[in-house]
Image (tube, helix red, strand yellow):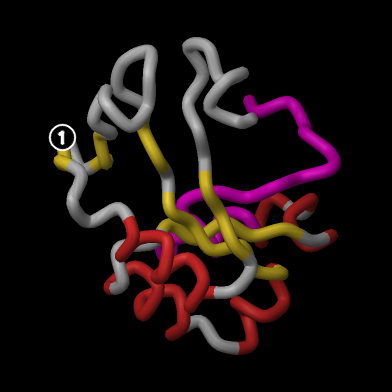
Amino acid sequence: MVFENVNDRSIIFSSFHPEAALLLQKCFLPYKRRNGKLQFREKEFPGGSAEILLKRFSEVKDVYRNPAAASKIKKSNLYLFTYGKLNNVPDAVYIQYMIGIEGVTVDLVQVIT
C-alpha cells in the first residue's frame, strides 16, 4: 500500500530501537549507494529511485545521560534524531549539534537572529 501511494515522495524508515534500525539497514544492503544515501532499484520500487534514511529516535534526556551513545549510533551508519521538551531550549539544541546529533524535533520555534 505504501509503494502504491508514494508518488514522487521519499520513503523514510525509522525506529526508536537501534537494533530494529540496524536490521532495516541490513535488509537494504544490496541496494546501491549514491552520495551517502541508498538508492532503490526501479524494479522493486516502481516510479524511479527513492532515498531512504535509516535513523534512531531518542528522548533528549537519554542522550544527555549517555552522550557517548551518539558516537556509537553514528559508527553504525545511523542518523540520530531527538525529541522532548529540552529541544525547545536553544542551548540544549546547540549542545546536541556539537555532539553530532543530526536532527531535533521541537514544539516551539523561535526567531533566529
Q: Position of residue 65 (x, y in %)?
A: 63, 87
In the picture, which quadrant includes the N terminus? top right
Membership of 109 in magenta stretch: yes
Count of numbered marks: 1
Which range is magenta?
93-113
Position above or below: 29 against 46: below
SS at mark 1?
strand
Position above or below: 40 against 94: above
Left or right for 72, reference 86: left
**Label 1 packing within 10 angstroms: few (<14), some (14-19), many (20+):** few
Left or right for 110, reference 42: right
The quarter of the picture where residue 70 lies is bottom left
Q: Position of residue 69 (x, y in %)?
A: 46, 82
Residue visible at 46% across and 52% down in the picture: 102
Between 66 and 79, the one lying in front of the other is 79
Q: Amino acid at mark 1?
A: Arg
Between 84 and 93, the one lying in front of the other is 84
Q: Position of residue 2 (x, y in %)?
A: 61, 31
Between 32 and 82, the one lying in front of the other is 32
Residue visible at 62% across and 55% down in the picture: 93
Q: Position of residue 106 (x, y in %)?
A: 76, 45
Residue visible at 50% across and 33% down in the picture: 11
Membership of 104 in magenta stretch: yes
In the picture, which quadrant includes the C terminus? top right
Between 84 and 75, the one lying in front of the other is 75
Left or right for 111, reference 103: right
Residue visible at 48% across and 56% down in the picture: 55
The residue at which mark 1 appears reads as 34
Position above or below: 38 against 49: below
